[in-house]
Amino acid sequence: MRYSIIFYLLLLFACPFWGQSPDQNYVLTKTYTQSDGSAALTQIQYYDGLGRPIQTVQQGISGESSADLVTFTEYDGFGREHIQWLPIVNAGNGAFVPKATFTGANTTKTTYYQGDAYPYNELLYEPSSLNRLVGHYGAGADWRSGQGHKESLSYEGNQANEVALFMIAGNEGLSRNGYYSPNTLYKTVTLDEDNKKTVEFKDMLGRVIMKQAWNGSIKHNTHYVFNDLNQLCYVISPKAADVLENMTGTANPQKNSPNQFCKSLYDLCYRYSYDNRGNCIETQLPGCDPVYMVYDKADRLILSQDGNQRPDNKWSFIKYDAYGRVIQTGHTTIEFHASGLNLNDLRSQYENLTVVESKNASGGYSLYTNNFPLGSNSIATVETFYDDYDFINFPLYSNQKPHLLYVDKFTQSDLAPFDVRYTNIQQNTDIATKGLKTGQIVRTADAMAMTNIEQSVLTALYYDERGRVVQTRGNNRLGGYDYDFFQYSFTGNVLRHRHVHKSSYIATALTEEYGFTYDAAQRLVTTTHKINTQREIILSVNSYDELGRLKTKTLNGGGETIEYAYNLRNWLKSITSPHFSQTQYYQDAPDGKPSYHNGNISALKWGQGSLQDEKYYFSYDGLNRMKKAQYTPNELFSEEITNYDKNGNILGIKRNGYLHDLYTEWPVYPGPIDDIGFEYNGNQLKNAWEMLHDQEYTVVATNDFRDAYDENISSRYLYDANGNQYADFNKGIAWIQFNSLNLPRKIQFGNGNKAEYWYDATGVKYGVKWTYAATPQNIPLGATGTEYPSPTGGMRTEYCGNYVYENGILRKIITPEGYVVTNSNNNLSEAIIKIAWWHCYFLKDHLGNTRRTLRGSQMKTGETTLYIYSHIIDYYPFGLEITRVYNPDSEYYHASYLAGATTPYLYNGKEIDRMHGLNWYDYGARYYDGAIGRWHGVDPLAHKFPSMSPYSAMGNNPIYFIDPDGREIAPASQKEWDRQKQYVIGQRDKLQGKVDNLTAKAADKGWSAEKLAGKIGNLNERVSSLNSSINTFGVLESSSQVYSLNKVGASDLGGVTLDPSSGEIVISFGNTANFVHETTHGGQFESGDIAFDGNTGNVLAQDIYDEVAAYKAQYAYDPSSVSGLPSTSGTRVTSFGGITPSWIQGLDGGTLYNPGGRANTGISPLHIHSTKTDFLRAYPHNPAIKSLPSSFVLKTSYPSIYYKK
């Protein structure tokens, strides 16, 4: 994408330019969307006379009239940002909008803000020279009613006996030494818009020591414990805090220990250990055995071992090439006893070696050498290739070569619309793909050999001149192949995508082709779908309102139109369509029910079309966890969480539904169907039981909880060393075997039935097989490895991308809006040839739950009408599907049914596995049970949410949150960014206020210029630096690059890394000073001063002067956060001038930024255009640089570089 930034300042350029206002200062930014410059996205940032941003105009970007979208900011008398107006639409062609247009009392509020009197956010400051933020009113008159509903902050010091003082004792144990003395910690108290209280305590180094959340009068404390090197060693969850805040002596984590402190550390806490170079060499999640990690000389992780791998001496390994790119991941065997080594020996063996492999010219089973075996029986389950396509000619892959070779439009004329491969031949070598991933082989998870190519997927990737994938080619596990072709717009949007699929189950390859169109603002408008040469189907057409929000979506070329509406705060208010509609309430709860102003949903109303006759009213506790969903009418389908423990583990669930009379399977009356009690060992479920004495009365067809009581079973649920639930007595699961990704490999039911799953090494499921026992068995609970030897019958499902096969017959092709299906018993591929197939569409609610399935007519008819394919599908809030009845008012016939029985993708849009009574949802990273509201394994990202149980689902607020893949709660909140930004603005304003006061005082008292300068000190320099940081925030906010925040909540040094899987740059920070530091690095990425390795996510071209800039920015916000840092340079920072390269190189004992240090920081300036000479100067002691070609330039020569384009 091409960028042009034009600065027009009134004093420098007085004539008008297009629609910009000549009497205003502004910066105009154009992002071209056409190669000839005929179209562009234009943004004008207007500034006042003091250089403060006051108005942002996005020219012509509104959804309906293509007018401007304008925001406006007001400042108070002290120059602090005070009022932030919601955007309005203005047909001004980029012109400045006068303040009166926003603040006027005429028709402005009615026209733009739904008649609301408060269409703005208001920031409140304490009446002192500190200028700290003490409150924030969000937009909306409803938030001003009564006593007001604002977010409030207050600043205090800790009190006596308020915060327990934990310390690291000998052998990395934990001890408690009383409490922090009064007023030694900074205490920030936050009340949200519903007066819910959270407290954060920080020490004088800015480290978060404790976070405290309040559920009414009950506090929930999360502690962070550091060692003397400022490294986070323990995180104590709230449930553990109740025990450990009273601990005596020293404790280490110990499973099933009789010592309650040791047991709590194992069951409920997070633990981290480090080597003398600061690498984290051991991590331990709650209820899990530790994970060991081994690093090489370059501080790169090369080996790791979890608790499940340890008994078999298995390790996972990572290997790198000379450029630090990951080339292999897999598993190996290292037997300490056989080799005479121990864990410390293993770490010592590799800490002085740089593990690097190169291409293998001698053949064998891998394209790479094995100079560093990293154990015996090493199996590379994923191999990645870079720079060229030599791997295609590797002998082992000879049978796959025809599927890997590039095909152009001259060989296949129907490829003419698609973009072509770029080549750049230099000295008989194509260098066009230098630095790019050109291919990959993915074997099965835990593959036992590298020779079975047929069960591996080998893919080649081809690129255009801008590094975009234009063609992928490879085999698949079904004895066929998959090819993809792409056409892009100038801005990089996909315009056309063709997918060719062939398997051994179908006689002829199928060709899908998707088409996409976009509006002037680059928003997706139309999605089309075509199979083979059949008629093209318009899957969806989107339209957007004036503020750029999705307004309508039309399915199947007009067969169903879905309308979306929003409230003043842009919260989704309603979804309306002829076959499913829903209305959400927040602060405006109906029928006199409790309202919520902090974003919690107070009620949902739903039904078909305008007939929305069903409701849920919601209530929450002080931690925003759902307490009850009251169904109306008659509480027929109510769900209640009777209580949670302090980590959010559910202690009881009650549900209502239909019951039957024991003589028939026909439900005859409503009543309670579940009253479940739970017992835990730490966070792990030990027992769950039904407290309804007559549970046999509940509906036969329902999938609610079933109690399989046996007085001889003391623990109905069992867990392995990685925290995976491997037995469930209530569901009749004798044992579950997991693969190395903690995904189920095999589920053995006690009655002999079985389910087997197959995953590749990246975690993609490609097969599942269900079988039955010929005769009932009685396999004991937890008897791992005991299985019924001769299962019969059953069903097999295989997944190949978006193609789903059942028992060897193609049944579904997944599309963005649903799937393609046939009701014929014949193969879907045959039905397509005969045009006897149709598209099915999912109607979804705000959580992505499938609420109804519609189908189009058969392709040959050409109709756009959609027909009902399922009844409305309803769910209890935690995901259990509601059982309905036919003819509930009939005296004789009340047959029960699950409306989603024929729909495979239900709650959160996830596939449900119903076989053998499992009823689990597959989220990708974990499985979920809606009957008990829990995951069956530990959250892989549990460390990001230490106050919550790793098994809790959706933050215990399933009406607001979803978990996209079982790892992380979404949506990510903008609040944290806005909060941190406001802290910086507030600090800037406070310092500027001091300067203004001193200047006024000097004028009043006749001070000399020297005296005034002495009084002001470095305040002006700090204000200038903070203004630069605020400008950097704006650059990041308006960038096409996606940034995400990871608040580590402790004094972790933070960092800026690339997430290769998502393409997001992750800014990790512990406090606001750290936030300023790390966003400075974000600005360096925007300017090309640094880049990232697209495979590892590590920073490239970071030099000591980048760190000087970042530490100066940090110092401007909070000098104490820098001045207190010890440096071997022997100097203490007391001014900006003290932040020098030598001072920074002396930090952390000289192990971090010094040459050869952990941060790999260059000693002279580097950027993306740096040459070999520049790198030799920056890294004089790195011999690997000498081997670089003389023509090396980072931007064009470094493989897999990710830089700001």
Image: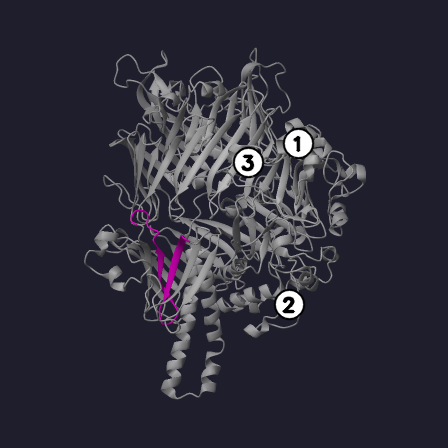
Sort mark 2 into few (<14), some (14-19) or many (20+) by Cα contacts within 10 Å: some
| Quarter assignment of residue 1006 | bottom left
State the SS at label 3.
loop
Residue 186 percent coordinates (x, y): 47, 62
**Which amino acid type is marked by label 1?**
Lys
851 relative position to 1033: left or right: left
State the SS at label 1.
helix
Which comes sooner in the sequence, label 1 or label 3? 1
843 relative position to 148: left or right: right
Give the residue displayed 36% in from the left and 12% down from the top.
664
Residue 692 percent coordinates (x, y): 39, 24
Q: Nearer the viewer, residue 274 or 858?
A: 858
Q: Which residues are magenta?
A: 38-65
In the image, residue 1150 above or below residue 583: below
Residue pointed to by mark 2: 1127
Give the residue displayed 77% in from the left and 46% down from the top.
345
State the SS at label 2.
loop
Q: Nearer the viewer, residue 1164 or 92?
A: 92
Q: How far apart are the alpha carbons under marks 1 and 3?
A: 19 Å
**Which amino acid type is marked by label 3?**
Lys
Q: Is residue 366 magenta?
A: no
Number of numbered markers = 3
Which comes sooner in the sequence, label 2 or label 3? 3
Residue pointed to by mark 1: 401
Which comes sooner in the sequence, label 2 or label 1? 1
Q: Is residue 44 magenta?
A: yes
Residue 1152 percent coordinates (x, y): 65, 60
Residue 726 shows in the view: no
Mark 1 against mark 3, which lies toward the viewer?
3
